[in-house]
Image (cartoon, rainbow, N blue to C red):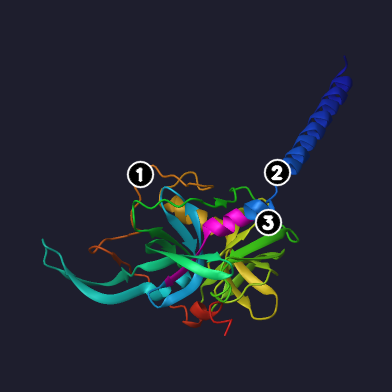
Amino acid sequence: MTVQKWLIAALCAFGIMAMLANIKSCSAAEAAPQWSIDAINDYIDKANVLVGDEDGDFCSGTVISIPNRFILTADHCVRNRIRREQKEFVDPITGVVTTATVERRLDLVVSKNIVKNYEIVSRQSLTAKIWARDPENDVAILQIVDPEYLPSYAATLAPDDYRLKRGETIYVVGNPGVEFDNSLTKGIVSATERTLDFGSGKKIKVFQIDAVAIGGNSGGSVLNEQGQIVGTLDAGLRGAGINFVVPIAATKKLLKNKGFKDTNGPGIAKNSATKIDERKSSGPGQVITMDLETWPRIFHRIMDRMAQ
């Protein structure tokens, strides 16, 4: 066989392989399970929670791990539970006195209303601590304090190779206006890459959606048609059908920085025992940090006061 014939045969074989691969890829996409009505209701009933403090609820959250009792929410939802003060520390060997900013994290309350015959008949409330946070990307992870408590359900995070596309359908689960808990709205991805600048010079990477969301939805989950979390609701423009979502990649990065290898869930596992997010411990419930956040307080209210 001549060289030319060998080349033709090789090209033909390559073309056949590429065609088969494309057919296989299309079949896999078509076979991907869609989020059924029953699955949607199961998710909302078990994974969505209210996040607040002793004064009441103000945000949404989502259970993302059963064994670790993790709740995903927005960092601006927990920012009012952070206390900072200047403290002096004395080196026991040199006697040198240094000053650092001490960050003390107050506990939060994670709640779930039980409704029957159009009335709230009971309410489950659990104490949670701020386990890890990423102010730069506005995501935070809470952990239910009670070690005996095991959630009955954990949401699945979209895989690392998942790529959003304009026009794809998304669902928003959360508690709009706080009073209207366990709500679901539907929309599309309007733009896949936006940045939000809140006047401090720090920019957050987000994507834009047109699904209805108001105050109380902050920190709630945004999901694709397979029921996987693709982001957490962050902010929006009142009455404009323009809302912004922090991609789930930010949450997965936070988890990976804490030692998790498999961050797709449900039931996110870890090699070692979980512990509170810390850089340098200054005692129980305290973290020494040198980076003060300067974002204006209005950022905390962008979504959570829109219902007023």
Image quadrant containing the C terminus: bottom right
* Residue occupied by mark 3: 164
Which residue sits at x=54%, y=52%? Answer: 155
Cα separation, mark 2 vs mark 3, equals: 16 Å
Q: Are marks 1 and 3 in contact (CB under 8 Å)?
A: no
Instruction: Assign a secondary structure to mark 3.
Output: loop
First in residue order: circle 2 vs circle 3: 2
Instruction: Assign a secondary structure to mark 2.
Output: loop
Instruction: Reply above or below: 78 against 240.
Output: above
Task: Name the front one of labels 2 and 3.
Answer: 2
Is 216 situated left or right of 66 in this image?
right
**Dot label at residue 32:** 2
Is 250 situated left or right of 185 in this image?
left
Region in magenta: 41-52
- Within 10 Å of disc 2 (Cα), the crowding (few <14, some 14-19, many 20+) is few
Instruction: Assign a secondary structure to mark 1.
Output: loop
Q: Nearer the viewer, residue 51 or 292?
A: 51
* Residue occupied by mark 1: 272
Is 105 situated left or right of 49 in this image?
left
Which residue sits at x=35%, y=68%? Answer: 107
Image quadrant containing the N terminus: top right
